[in-house]
Every structure is written in structure tokens, then in C-alpha cells.
Image (cartoon, rainbow, N blue to C red):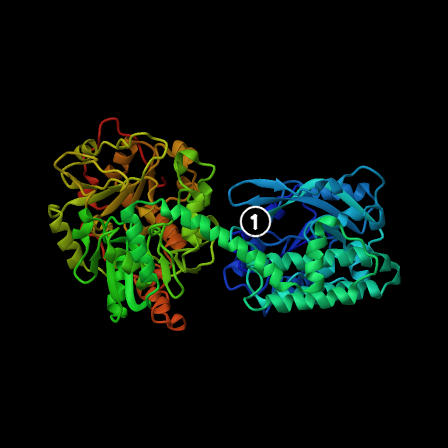
Amino acid sequence: MPRFSVIVPAYKVQAYLPECLESVLTQSCPDLELIAVDDRSPDACGTIIDEYAARDARVRPVHLPENQGLGGARNAGMAQARGDYLVFLDGDDTLTPDALRAVADRVKETGEPDVLVYDYAQTFWTGRAERDKLASQLTEQGPAPFRLEDRPGLLRVLMVAWNKAYRREFVEEHGLAFPPGYYEDTPWTYPALMAAGSIATLDRVCVHYRQRRRGSILGTTSRRHFDIFDQYDRVFAFVDARPELAHWRPLLFRRMVDHFSTVFTRRERLPRGTRGEFLRNARAHCRRYRVEGTPVRWRTRLRHALVHHGLHRTYRAVQLAMWARRRTVKAGVKAARGLRSALLQLHYRVQLRLPLRADRAVFAAYWNRGHGCNPGALEQAFRSHAPHIRTAWIARPEHQHTIPPGPRRLRPGTLAYWTALARSKYLVNNVNFDRRLRKRPGQVFVQTQHGTPLKHMGLDLQDRPAAAADLDFEELLRGVDKWDYLLSANRHTTLTWERVYPGGYTTLEYGYPRNDVFQQATSADVTRIRASLGIPEGSVVLLYAPTHRDYRRTQRPALDLDRIVRRLGPRFVILARAHYWHGGPLGTGPRVIDVSAHPNVESLCLASDALVTDYSSIMFDYANLDRPIVVHTEDWDAYDAARGTYFDLRSGPPGAVARTEDELIDIFADGHWCGSRSAQLRAAFRERFCRYDDGRAAERVVRHVVLGEPAGLPEFVPLSERHPVPSAASGLGQPPLATVPQPSGHLPVTDGR
């Protein structure tokens, strides 16, 4: 019998669940069972739970056949519990290190109390942590254990289930269970504390209560907030059935009225048209449970009076006054803008009042740099699979030439630009549009992103000042709030995006549209692209695409490409592509072709026979071609320290790894770049990151988002059945390449690199 049964319900928390489970399994008190309840979650929660169960015998997975809600999931976990004490933890929260050890020590010290109350800290998306302001109620001074009558101030502490440990036999003796509906903690915590024969406190933060930016389920608009009335009916029924608890009725009454007024004053909770009904119900409950002579603090008398008398119009008048004040302030700020901007915005607002054009879609990529990436592939897919949609592409004047025939061309900041943003039903971008965009009802924003994350992104940059620079996180997340769909190429990307870009969007794990071409291109396409780039026939072409260094003031080339091609011999040609944040040639020799300005990186990938990169996300896309990849990691430690990475690329690379320039030369000179060990590494890498890039990602997105056919999407083609177009070079790894002259100072390299 374990000491603790930690019950974790999971529903739509896949981005946070691994951290939650790890916080339990890494506790210094290992005497526990972790009961993880998949509440029929539509995301990967069930799979994540099963993966942890396969690795650790202490994890006991429970899969519910139907969604039960938080209360039902907890009850299902309790039915399986065998521990001395029950501990509840929500799937997006975490236990602090050594928390269970501290709980175990305090429980033993205080003689096995029925309930132990411990502290928590709210952790915000900004990285700030804030301990509960009522932590003073948890002082360990004085006699322990005690009864609630001795320390009634505990009822002021947040009334939730997860900041307490409960003796399992006590719970079973009193038949405590969670009811259905919202506010399910209310009829659990009050009865548990009032019925407990012994209570103890632990003055220690044991839980990090995650404050998700979009708030909890209680912050959503729904009639289910009316469940609060049934929950307090259950609390008073529990008290009425136990005459010895009757003295708690006055206090419960005050807490009930406070709770009703809190729900009422939160504008986001009650649906429009139900606020008067809510107050009428609150008034009825006040009359039903009122205890004559119940004192009310002067600071809350007005609020209690409004609830008692159901003064809905008074509340409404106050709220309207506050709304009018906010509107006035905003109008004053807007009035300060320049004349041209003001006129454009006036035009935009006029357009916002005109009907949406359901047959229009507007696209952009990389801050209006030109046609390409995932939006470019989707724009073509719109024209192929939804030809009734008229497309437009936004690009700055210097990039207008990249737009192919078909879409209408738009320039940022023009009348046509603002008209398109206001009236097009579909908005597609791999970054955010203009921050002044007001996404109106009926518009659909597809955020495609532009790579699989190796480096830290989004909110994870808050503690990386060198990488974040002047990034405005609040503005970033205001943009996230406009997304309806977010594209992902693999589960790693899905879990990362949902955590670092928290929002209410739907993730489409369909693959990246820009990679479709790798499965659709032909050998004739490869030949044509190589000819357009001036690549001599029979050449072995290396595409070199490094990423940006946040820790460097100037972006000097990490490799001497001219030296590399001289050492490797006349058959090798390097296509050098600088990161889009900075241009400039990476080499000047006759066999180093600068392709930094080339509008289509996918064409460069098709033209090459191998990729040389460092930490660029291009490696995840290139792996879909199943061609060799060599990673140069000379400054990994500095890069990781400045930017932060999600995994150590050196321990799970897509191919051979070179720590220095000479090692890179050796890898190609010895043929290890296309050897069997490199192929094995690439296969494992593809299995992890390329499952969904089967050539039909764009079609899936269009069928789901535009045509409304999510149930009839094409099945994913297994990796073993895909046949991406081969590279133009023949005989990779055979004698023609093995006879490359060895450079001086040759370093021995094994195929097990």
C-alpha cells in the first residue's frame, strides 16, 4: 500500500501534462502511485499517459469511455486509489520538488490527520510566481492537529481540492465524492474541512498553480456557471444532515453570497441575457439559507445587498459606465495617430462594417517578404482544391516579383490591403499580420508557422534576453488570440506550440504544406531547377543553410566555404543560403553559389544532394527528402546558452555531426555523410519528425478549413511507402566519391559518428 495516491485528471492539457507527470514521478518521496485519468481527451493526453505507464510501474492509467468532467475523473481515480493519503493535482499544474517528502514528514509529525492543508503559488505565463496572500493561515505554530473550529480562518484559503492531502479512510467513511458540473470543489472542500476530526497545516508551497493565459474553464462563457446554485445546495444538505455542523451555517451563507457576486461581476462568465436570471436565482438562495442576525462586513454590505435584492440594472449601469470610460480612453489614443494612418484606419473600419467576402482569401509570409513557405503552398492548394476562392498575396514592393500568376498582388499599407484584411474570410500567414488587424466574426485565421522548433520560441524566450531582444510578449499573445487554426508537422511541434503560444486555436497536425513538393516533385523538376541555378552536370551539390546567432552582434560565416570546396575537389558545389534576417554572401569562390535571394528554399533542397546546417529548422523539412544531412555544432554550447533548445541535437541528429570545419571536410571526404550509420540516424529522425509530411498536407488543410470535410481527409502515407524524388547525383558513397583527395591534417572519422 503506497503512502500517497496522486490523482491527475487530464483533458486537453497535452502541452502541460508531461511536466505535470514528471513533477510527481521525480519526487524525493517515491512511495506513491500516480493515477492518471484520461477523461476521454480528444488530444494526445491518453497516449502520453500510456507512454509514462510503460516507463514507470507507479503510473496507473485510467481511460474513461466518455468525458466525465473534472469531478467524474477525480472520482474514477479515487476508485482505483490504494494509498494512505489522496493528493489531487490538475493536469496543467505541478508539484514542487520534495513536496511529498514535506507532506509525509508533516503528516507523521501531526499524528496522521484527516486533512493536511498546504500552500501553493500561482505561476504566470510571464514567468512570475506569486504565493497565496493568505499563506499566514497555514502557520505551523500552535497545537496540531486541530479542528476547524480552532482555526476557522482556513476557510478563507482557496477552496480547491488540490491544496490538501486527505486520509483515504476518512474520505471513504464520510462518503465524500465530487459532484458533476462547474464549481465541483465547493461541495467537496467545505464538507471535508467541516467534518474532519483532525486538521494540520504545512507552511510550504507544494503546488505550482499554472495561470494559463486564456484562463481556466471557469473563465469561459456558459450557462454552466449556474451550476454554482446546485453546488451550494449540496453543501447545505451536507450540513443539514449533520446537526453538529449547524453552527457553520452563518459563515457558509456569507461565503455563498460572496461567491455568487464574484461569478456575477466577472463579465466573461455569464452569457448575454442571463444575468438577471442569475441574480434572481441568487436572491432565492439568499432567502432560503439566510440565518437571521448574520453579520456582514461593511466593505461587502453593498455587494450583499445587490445580490439579496437582485439589483441587476444597478450592476449593469456601473458596468456600462466603466465600458464608456474605456472607450473614451481608446478613442483619445487613436486620435493621436498621423493623418495618413487615421484615414487608412477610417477606411478599414468602414470596410469592417461591410459584408465578408466568403470567396476571398489573403496570404502573406515572413513579414510580407514574398510568396513562399507554408502560406505559398496553401495559396496554390486553395486555387487547386477550392477554385471558387479568389486569393490575394501581400508583399512589399521589392518582393512583388516572387508572386506567381494567379493571386492578386497587394502592397502593405494601401487601401486595397486594408480592404482585403477587413473583408476576406480567410487569412493565412506564417507570422502575425499587422497588429491593428481586427479579426471579425466569420473570419478564419490559419497560422502556419515556418518550421519545427529546435530553439526556444514564444513564451520560452522570456528568460532569454539575448534572443528575445525587444520582443513584446503581450503584443505577441494578442496576435495569438486571433488564430483559429495552427499547423503542426509532428507531436513535438504540437506540444511546443500549444505551450509557448497559449490560445484558443485548433491545432491541425497535418504536416507542413511547404513540404508537399518533396513527395510530388519529379526527376525532371530536379534537373530543371539545377539547370536554372547553373549547376554543372555530375556535380555533388551541398546546400549550406545556417541559422541566426542571437549571441553575436555581427553574423560572420561559421564556415569557410571556399576552403571546403577546394579541399573536397571539383565535383562538389555549395549552394550558400544566408538566414533571411541578414543577407550577404557566405562565399565567393566559383563553386560557391549564393542563393540567399532565391525565392523558394524548397527548390534549393530539391536541387541539392545533401544538406549542411547547424541548428536551422530546415533540417526537419529536408529530412522528408530522405537525403543525407550533416550538422555542424562547433558553437552548440554558446548557442544553447543564449537561445535555449528543446533537445540536444548532438544526441539525436539527423545524420553525421561535425564539431569543427575539418571534421566536416572529413565526413564528406570519407563518404560518411552518406554511410549506413548516417542513414540509420536519418531514419530515426524521420520517424520522430516527418510522420505527417506525406505530400498532402495542404490538401488536408483546405479540405478541413475551407471545404468542411474533416471526416474525409486523406489517410497518412506511412514513411515506408513514400518515395520522395531522388537527388540528381548518382552512386552516392560509391568509388567516385570515395576517391576525393584527403585534406592535410586529416582527422580519422568513423561511420559511427
Q: Position of residue 531 (x, y in %)?
A: 11, 50
Amino acid type at circle 1 is: Gln
Camera-side residue of 292 and 59? 292
Placement of the C terminus among the 4 image quadrants: top left
Camera-side residue of 725 and 209? 209
Q: Residue at x 75, y 42 (%)?
A: 137
Q: Residue at x 29, y 48 (%)?
A: 341
**Element carrying mark 1:** strand
The quarter of the picture where residue 46 lies is bottom right
Q: Is residue 717 left or right of residue 65?
A: left
The quarter of the picture where residue 200 lies is top right
Residue 635 higher or lower than 235, as above or below: above
Q: Is residue 201 left or right of residue 601?
A: right
Q: Is residue 397 left or right of residue 228?
A: left
Q: Residue at x 28, y 59 (%)?
A: 419
Camera-side residue of 301 and 171? 301
Q: Which residue is mark 1?
A: 211
Q: Position of residue 711 (x, y in %)?
A: 41, 72
